[in-house]
Image (cartoon, helix red, strand yellow):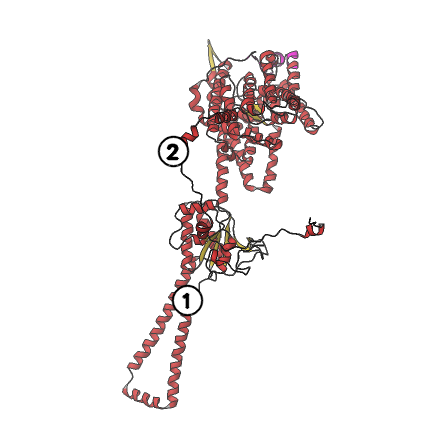
């Protein structure tokens, strides 16, 4: 057995050496690679295979639609049950006050928040693939629903004017208004559920990728601003109308400032006290989370104490502090949603469906990565869709994953959705048995709970300096998502943010980095000559690199960058050639004029002059002088030939240009035409263009686009830049398998 010492192991280096011919794509496609023969299937065969039913396929379909069947039979009771019980009780206790509070955001009576915290959570246990997220009410979604409900059922539509003699009084029919808003919220939830189920069945789970992290964080921060402003009137105990649409947050804030003089002192004192207590307990939970067996349930403590205080000192009767009011016991019977609103809610439903799914799947993937399992994005869409669709028949409003509750559910030891099931049972117990006890709960306390839960979202403002240092484009996405969502509303703000994010992608492809590559000595590596000292160019060869694909939006930029970086512009060189030709033509014409004048002078010579010339010819000295004239003419002819020779010299010392296609992922017809045109332009000035590192998919695109025709063949394509360089250095050797040579410079050897 061979032993390797530490010194030998430290000094040993893995060597990479390949000796092979210089290949081009023509040789590879005809000699080296052969495509597999595939028998194309007919449409009938495809449909038969797709819809063929078997026990195995049926079992797989059922298990994918009901993921609980995959893990519940093997549920390790001893290992998981205790953690799930503690987590479920902790999350359920947290879900109660949040359900009541977020119902106010959704512009519906608080009890509907409890309904929304029971049915969807119960359903997600059976259909969801994530083991840790907590489904239920969420501030952002609730606020979006509230905006739609207020738009469809404004206060002005329920003002009743009563005339008593000469006096006219008006009052607001809150019961009719709330009933109408519940109908709107339920119809919207029904539509959201249908959209999410359809997206899931059509495998549209990929739509979440368009909601990049900076966009989501900017959007949720803007939503936090909306939520905070909307809760100010409850915290201060004042009455203002609720606004929706563009600039609603501005109008709401102005309305609060105008009515600041009517602030209820008891309400604001109680609300601020609750906020201070909640923030303090959250800090304690965060700082001592490793030492505490379960987080301190600050919200339920606040709810219980404030309800007792409100009931004991009669805050509503004596101090006019608004309270939750009537909470009916028991569950409502199922009812069909009111479909008359559907036509007005489609756009809102799509936005809420996408935002809700994005929130849920992003949190689900975080926990799945942490705990080593996978989540199915399409099944998550179906699960959320079922929760909302079925829940709408039981008077719930749209739900999604709550970040704060999910963190509690995971940190308190939750292992599976059994924890979510238990949390829903806690809510059921309150709805059925003890819900009426929360009727004296002040609304300012619910506003305090909502505001305290916004701290995490407001901390996202820290993203701004971080993104400024790392990525200005992502910072722009964050700021646009925030500003648009604050000013235009969450629905239109999201649309603007997504559109801007897509524009940044187009901007990046239209602003690629162009560079000239040089070879690192004794390697097959090629790097930017402007960045690395070791990168050296080969004489007469320019290697052009652009870090983008080539398509209609940037094909002109690619061609312009090619000409600028290589310093070889065919149009300019052709113009230079024409100027030289024109100059040579003028010089020739001038010479011809001189010769013509000399001939005319000779014809006009008199006979005496001719005789004298004959005598001079007989005289040796005169003969010598005549030879001098002849020598002068010869010099003229020599200078003329030198001009012709200079004209025939190459216009540039670059004889080959290699396009590095390694970063090119696709090319369209416009890009192919532009590339083909520029190759022909370079051919006209005797500069050959080659392509190196072209992928098989891009090669297939070029073939499909009829790129190869005439002088442009697949012999111009090489599998790597190094192959192309070696071929350009040894053009006299035939490309392909026959171009093998023994010296290292000729072979494709790399080490």
Please provide percent x and percent y for residue 387. Answer: 52, 22
Task: Estimate the spatial distance between the alpha carbons at disc 2 and disc 1, rounded to whole Å.
Answer: 62 Å
The foreground one among 96 and 382 is 382
Image location of residue 409, percent across then percent down: 62, 25
Q: Residue 524: give x, y in percent of width and height.
A: 55, 54
| Residue sitting at the far top | 165
Within 10 Å of the Cα at label 1, are there few (<14), some (14-19), or many (20+) other Cα atoms?
A: few
Which residues, given as a range, are shown in magenta? 309-334
The residue under label 2 is 43
Tell me, yes or no, whether the highlighted magenta stretch contains residue 433: no
Of mark 2 and mark 1, the one earlier in the sequence is 2
Q: Residue furthest left?
A: 607
The reply to whether discs 2 and 1 touch (Cβ–Cβ < 8 Å) is no
* Horizontal relation, residue 59 to residue 751: left or right: left
Q: Which residue is found at the position 40% from the left and 79% from the top?
A: 632
- Residue 129: percent from left, percent from top: 55, 27
Element at label 2: helix
Q: Quadrant of the C terminus?
A: bottom right
Up/down of 38 relative to 627, above or below: above
**How many marks on residues?**
2
Q: From the viewer's perspective, is 59 left or right of 322?
A: left
- Find disc 1 in the rendering and name its residue: 648
Residue 361 placement: quadrant = top right
**In the image, is residue 327 part of the stretch drawn in magenta?**
yes
Q: Is residue 220 above or below residue 423?
A: below
Circle nearer the viewer, 2 or 1: 2
């Amino acid at each position: 057995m061979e032993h390797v010492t530490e010194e030998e192991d430290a000094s040993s280096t893995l060597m990479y050496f390949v000796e092979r011919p210089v290949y081009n794509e023509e040789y590879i496609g005809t000699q080296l690679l052969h495509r597999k023969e595939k028998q194309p299937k007919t449409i009938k065969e495809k449909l038969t295979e797709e819809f063929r039913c078997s026990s195995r396929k049926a079992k797989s379909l059922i298990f994918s639609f009901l993921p609980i069947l995959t893990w519940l039979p093997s549920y390790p009771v001893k290992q998981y049950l205790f953690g799930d019980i503690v987590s479920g009780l902790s999350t359920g206790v947290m879900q109660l006050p949040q359900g009541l509070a977020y119902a106010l955001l959704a512009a519906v009576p608080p009890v509907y928040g409890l309904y929304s915290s029971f049915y969807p959570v119960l359903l997600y246990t059976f259909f969801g693939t994530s083991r840790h997220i907590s489904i239920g009410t969420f501030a952002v979604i609730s606020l979006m629903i509230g905006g739609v409900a207020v738009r469809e059922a404004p206060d002005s539509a329920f003002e009743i004017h009563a005339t008593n003699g000469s006096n006219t009084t008006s009052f607001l029919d809150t019961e009719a208004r709330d009933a109408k808003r519940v109908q709107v919220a339920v119809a919207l939830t029904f539509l959201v559920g249908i959209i999410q189920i359809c997206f899931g069945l059509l495998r549209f789970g990929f739509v979440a990728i368009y909601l990049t992290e900076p966009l989501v964080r900017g959007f949720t921060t803007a939503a936090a601003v909306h939520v905070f402003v909307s809760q100010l009137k409850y915290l201060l105990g004042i009455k203002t109308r609720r606004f929706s649409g563009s600039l609603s947050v501005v109008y709401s804030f102005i309305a609060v400032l105008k009515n600041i003089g009517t602030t209820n002192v008891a309400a604001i004192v109680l609300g601020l006290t609750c906020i201070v207590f909640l923030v303090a307990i959250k800090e304690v939970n965060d700082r001592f989370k490793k030492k505490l067996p379960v987080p301190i349930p600050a919200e339920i403590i606040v709810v219980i104490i404030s309800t007792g205080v409100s009931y004991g000192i009669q805050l509503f009767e004596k101090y006019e502090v608004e309270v939750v009011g009537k909470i009916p016991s028991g569950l409502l019977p199922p009812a069909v949603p009111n479909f008359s609103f559907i036509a007005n809610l489609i756009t809102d439903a799509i936005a809420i469906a996408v935002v809700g799914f994005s929130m849920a799947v992003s949190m689900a993937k975080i926990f799945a990565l942490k705990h080593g399992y996978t989540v199915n994005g399409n099944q998550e869409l179906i699960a959320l869709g079922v929760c909302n669709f079925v829940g709408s028949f039981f008077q719930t409003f749209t739900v999604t994953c709550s970040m704060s509750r999910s963190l509690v559910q995971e940190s308190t030891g939750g292992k599976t959705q059994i924890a979510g099931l238990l949390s829903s049972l806690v809510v059921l117990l309150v709805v059925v048995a003890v819900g009426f006890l929360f009727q004296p709960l002040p609304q300012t306390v619910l506003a305090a709970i909502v505001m305290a839960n916004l701290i995490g979202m407001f901390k996202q403002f820290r993203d701004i300096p971080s993104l400024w240092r790392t990525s200005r484009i992502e910072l722009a996405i964050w700021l646009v998502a925030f500003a648009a969502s604050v000013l235009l509303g969450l629905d239109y703000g999201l649309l603007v943010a997504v559109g801007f994010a897509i524009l940044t992608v187009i901007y990046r492809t239209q602003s690629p980095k162009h560079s000239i590559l040089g070879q690192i000595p004794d390697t097959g590596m090629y790097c930017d000559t402007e960045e690395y000292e070791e990168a050296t160019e080969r004489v007469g060869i320019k290697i052009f690199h652009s870090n983008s694909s080539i398509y209609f939006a940037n094909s002109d930029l690619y061609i312009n960058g090619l000409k600028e970086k290589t310093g070889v512009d065919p149009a300019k060189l052709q113009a230079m050639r024409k100027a030289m030709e024109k100059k040579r033509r003028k010089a020739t014409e001038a010479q011809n004029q001189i010769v013509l004048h000399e001939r005319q002078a000779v014809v006009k010579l008199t006979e005496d002059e001719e005789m004298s010339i004959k005598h001079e010819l007989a005289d040796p000295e005169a003969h010598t002088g005549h030879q001098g004239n002849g020598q002068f003419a010869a010099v003229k002819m020599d200078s003329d030939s030198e001009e012709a020779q200079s004209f025939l010299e190459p216009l540039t010392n670059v004889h080959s240009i290699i396009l590095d296609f390694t970063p090119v992922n696709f090319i369209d017809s416009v890009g192919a035409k532009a590339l083909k045109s520029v190759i022909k332009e370079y051919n006209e000035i005797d500069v050959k263009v080659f392509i190196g590192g072209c992928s098989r998919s891009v090669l297939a695109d070029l073939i499909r686009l009829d790129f190869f025709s005439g002088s442009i063949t697949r012999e111009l394509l090489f599998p790597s830049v190094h192959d192309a360089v070696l071929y350009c250095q040894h053009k006299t050797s035939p490309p392909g398998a026959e171009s093998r040579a023994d010296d290292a410079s000729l072979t494709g050897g790399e080490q």
